[in-house]
Image (cartoon, helix red, strand yellow):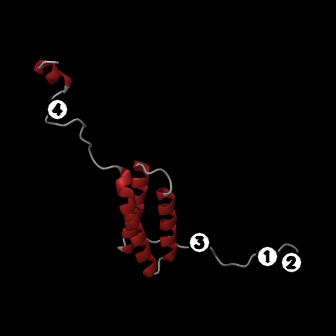
Amino acid sequence: MPDAEWDKRAIPIRTIDGDAHSVEGTSPAHELPELYRAVLERVGLLELSGHRREGELIRRGAIAAYSRAWDDTARRRLEHLRVRAERVLGGFERPRIDRTTGALVRRPGTA
């Protein structure tokens, strides 16, 4: 039967810090759902305040960012969209407008 000294060497002593290294910050994947919801809340406010076109553009950008890789680039893009919506709602930036003129287009062969 092995002696007590051999048994102590077989099971290493854990350090105070633990086995895993500490993780700094949070993963973008943990932040994205909350950030996405925040952007969509601002889109709703934009639409209620009459800025439907701006809300539509921000929503499209948010969907595009959220449906791609959940990385730092997506987090930055969603954060930018949230800030953009807040600035428009606060009156610090002008909302983008629909540039269509509504002019009739002449059909070929008509005078």
- Residue under the image location 39 percent in, 66 percent down: 37
Pointers 4 and 1 in contact (C-beta within 8 Å): no
Amino acid found under the numbered disc labelled 2: Thr
Which of 14/37 is in front? 14
Q: Is residue 66 left or right of residue 87?
A: right
Pointers 1 and 2 in contact (C-beta within 8 Å): yes
Residue pointed to by mark 2: 110
Q: Which mark is residue 14?
A: 4
Q: Is residue 47 left or right of residue 91?
A: right
Q: Quadrant of residue 81?
A: bottom left
Pointers 3 and 1 in contact (C-beta within 8 Å): no
Gap in Å between the C-alphas at discs 3 and 4? 66 Å
Q: Residues within 10 Å of mark 2 (few under 14, many from 20)?
A: few
Pointers 2 and 4 in contact (C-beta within 8 Å): no
Identify the image quadrant of the C terminus. Answer: bottom right
Amino acid found under the numbered disc labelled 4: Arg
Residue pointed to by mark 1: 106
Which of discs 2 and 4 lies nearer the camera? The answer is 4
Q: Secondary structure at mark 1?
A: loop
Q: Mark 3 or mark 4: which comes first in sequence?
A: 4
Q: Secondary structure at mark 2?
A: loop
Q: Secondary structure at mark 3?
A: loop
Residue pointed to by mark 3: 99
Q: Mark 2 or mark 4: which comes first in sequence?
A: 4
- Residue under the image location 66 percent in, 78 percent down: 102
Identify the image quadrant of the N terminus. Answer: top left
Q: Position of residue 19 (x, y in %)?
A: 23, 35
Q: Residues within 10 Å of mark 1 (few under 14, many from 20)?
A: few
Q: Position of residue 85 (x, y in %)?
A: 40, 68
- Residue under the image location 48 percent in, 72 percent down: 55
Gap in Å between the C-alphas at discs 3 and 1? 19 Å
